């Protein structure tokens, strides 16, 4: 089974190298991944992420259902258009998926990963028992992400070329705060993304995606492949499902603690009981944590490499592992997310049989084009 | 050349011979017929006086993607054919580079240490890795010519 987005031919026309991505033929790059990465950090680029799964939730119990389904609390979405990042956990507190949920006029819109689509939809359907709620996948919607310091103005400049109310819609888009969106007819435009840069995600009917794509390219926005999307998200310290966490990993071991709404304590979300036990383990130093490391010399940290870890007194701890590693095009050296024992104070990575010291940093490497760690 | 780590979230693409336009003006999309090739995607070209230049093929650089580090052997080292003698790291993967022939390393391309992307842009020219004094010219007979190498790439 191979799926193609409505922009498949446009990708080929732009010189894309196409790869299989969870059953979708998607562009990995259009020539140079590093040039595309830099384009997003310094100007504006557009990603076709129409392979991602959009799920709309409506009905009188929509809020109560999502308060049960998600570790974060949709009650925090106090206005239509607001967005929230959340894990969807199993009863053991493992991460079934991570997602963005938007509050919409009709209810809620979730964007989940394409690789986990089948199990996500099955889990969401199972959880509807007892709730007056409709959970509907929206395969007719595509997503274009336009990111970079110039991205918002570039989008605003081409709205009328897409037959839209250019001035009023541009004003509505410019007025958006981070993690907020606005419904503009059959488009939903939000200040969310996966790059650590300012930018927009436009969710729109798939048949309209080519027109927007063409207008953006004509307006100087460059196409960006999924390769650069990965280096951009890793520089921003953002997790990738299936690499940095999965169903066997607690969100507390995946740097997702910020997305767990513990209060109100009476809210009984999926995985809560397990999480409470895991929180105690974390406090006792028995749960590993996800953090960042940098290698400022030559070499590239790679997923799966092991780390020998020591605490502040030099005692050897359990082994750690690189969950995502890459060369950072912005920093010109390697960065990685690693899962290590709680009290790890220093570590060395096993690279091709050699123990190479790496420096531990907060897992947020680049934001808005600039290095953010000390 | 053999990838020993692939780290990104994509499947390793298995392209036929690269068809997209190159970033440099040099036309490197054709396989030079003055080179011999190893099935592991290194090329070797006899320059003069039994000195051979070694690099990786255009097919190899295209499959690797943006190259960010190259580790080279030491001048003076004596190596055997099929030894791992260099490492090339791209954003996507680290790969060992094998010497197609035996002999003594007489020169390395130090420009690659600061400008590894040269391997992407001109793999058969400025992107060479090292020069080696051939020990046994008969080893060249075991390597593929341009035509056989093209077939080898298509069959991968």
Image (spheres, helix red, strand yellow):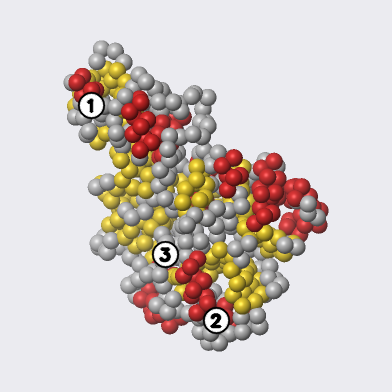
Q: Report the residue marked by disc 2.
A: A128
- Residue sitting at x 78%, y 52%: A163
Q: Is any atom of residue A35 visible in this view?
A: no
Tell me the element at label 2: loop
Tell me the element at label 1: helix
Mark 1 and mark 3 in contact? Answer it, CB < 8 Å: no
Q: CA distance from mark 2 to mark 3?
A: 25 Å
Seen from the viewer's position, the closer of residues A10 and A302 is A10
Seen from the viewer's position, the closer of residues B54 and B142 is B142
Crowding near the residue tagged with mark 2, few <14, some 14–19, many ≥20 C-alpha atoms within 10 Å: some
Q: Report the residue marked by disc 3.
A: A245
Residue B72: mark:
none
Residue B98, given in percent of the width and then of the height, sits at: 27, 33
Residue A161, given in percent of the width and then of the height, sits at: 76, 47
- Among numbered discs 2 and 3, the one appearing first in the sequence: 2
Residue A168 in the image: above or below residue A273: above
- Residue sitting at x 61%, y 42%: A222
| Disc number lying in front (1 or 3) | 1
- Residue sitting at x 35%, y 25%: B146
Dividing the picture into quadrants, the one containing residue A141 is: bottom right
Residue B50, given in percent of the width and then of the height, sits at: 24, 15
Crowding near the residue tagged with mark 1, few <14, some 14–19, many ≥20 C-alpha atoms within 10 Å: few
Q: Chain of mark 1?
A: B
- Residue sitting at x 49%, y 23%: B26
Q: Chain of mark 2?
A: A
Seen from the viewer's position, the closer of residues A128 and B70 is A128
Tell me the element at label 3: loop
Q: CA distance from mark 1 to mark 3?
A: 47 Å
Mark 2 and mark 3 in contact? Answer it, CB < 8 Å: no
């Amino acid at each position: 089974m191979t799926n193609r987005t409505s922009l498949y031919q446009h990708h080929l026309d732009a010189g894309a190298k196409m790869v299989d991505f969870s059953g979708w033929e998607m562009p990995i790059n259009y020539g140079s991944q590093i040039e595309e990465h830099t384009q997003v950090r310094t100007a504006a680029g557009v990603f076709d992420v129409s392979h991602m799964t959009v799920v709309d939730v409506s009905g009188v119990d929509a809020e109560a259902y999502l308060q049960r389904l998600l570790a974060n609390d949709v009650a925090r979405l106090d206005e239509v258009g607001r967005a929230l990042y959340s894990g969807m956990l199993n009863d053991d507190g493992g991460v079934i998926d991570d997602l963005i949920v938007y509050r919409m006029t009709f209810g809620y819109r979730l964007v989940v990963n394409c690789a986990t689509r089948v199990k996500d939809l099955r889990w969401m359907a199972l959880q509807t028992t007892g709730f007056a709620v409709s959970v509907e996948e929206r395969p007719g919607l595509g997503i274009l992400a336009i990111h970079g310091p110039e991205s918002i103005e570039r989008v605003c400049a081409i709205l009328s070329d897409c037959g839209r109310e250019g001035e009023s819609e541009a004003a509505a888009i410019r007025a958006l705060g981070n993690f907020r969106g606005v419904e503009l007819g059959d488009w939903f435009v939000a200040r969310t993304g996966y790059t650590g840069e300012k930018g927009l995600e436009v969710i729109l009917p798939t048949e309209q995606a080519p027109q927007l794509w063409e207008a953006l390219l004509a307006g100087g926005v460059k196409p960006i492949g999924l390769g650069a999307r990965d280096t951009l998200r890793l520089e921003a310290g953002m997790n990738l499902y299936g690499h940095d966490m999965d169903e066997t990993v607690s969100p507390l071991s995946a740097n997702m603690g910020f997305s767990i709404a513990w209060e109100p304590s009476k809210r009984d979300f999926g995985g809560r009981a397990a999480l409470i036990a895991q929180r105690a383990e974390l406090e006792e130093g028995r749960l590993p944590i996800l953090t960042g490391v940098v290698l400022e010399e030559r070499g590239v940290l790679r997923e799966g490499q092991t780390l020998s870890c020591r605490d502040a007194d030099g005692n050897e701890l359990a082994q750690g592992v690189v969950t995502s590693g890459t060369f950072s095009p912005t920093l010109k050296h390697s960065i990685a997310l690693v899962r290590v024992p709680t009290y790890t104070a220093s570590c060395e990575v096993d690279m091709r049989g050699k123990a190479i010291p790496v420096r531990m940093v907060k897992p947020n490497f680049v934001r808005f084009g600039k290095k953010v760690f000390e | 050349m053999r990838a020993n780590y692939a780290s990104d979230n994509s499947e390793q693409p298995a392209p036929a011979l690269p068809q997209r336009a190159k970033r440099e003006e040099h036309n490197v999309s054709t396989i030079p017929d003055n080179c011999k090739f190893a099935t592991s995607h290194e090329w070797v070209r006899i320059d003069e006086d039994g000195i051979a230049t070694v690099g990786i093929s255009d097919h190899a650089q295209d499959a690797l993607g943006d190259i960010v580090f190259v580790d080279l052997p030491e001048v003076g080292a004596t190596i055997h054919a099929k030894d791992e003698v260099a490492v090339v790291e791209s954003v996507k993967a680290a790969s060992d580079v094998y010497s197609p022939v035996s002999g003594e390393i007489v020169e390395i391309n130090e420009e690659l240490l600061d400008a590894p992307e040269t391997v992407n842009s001109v793999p058969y020219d400025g992107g060479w890795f090292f020069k080696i004094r051939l020990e046994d010219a008969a080893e060249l007979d075991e390597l593929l010519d341009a035509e056989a190498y093209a077939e080898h790439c298509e069959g991968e």
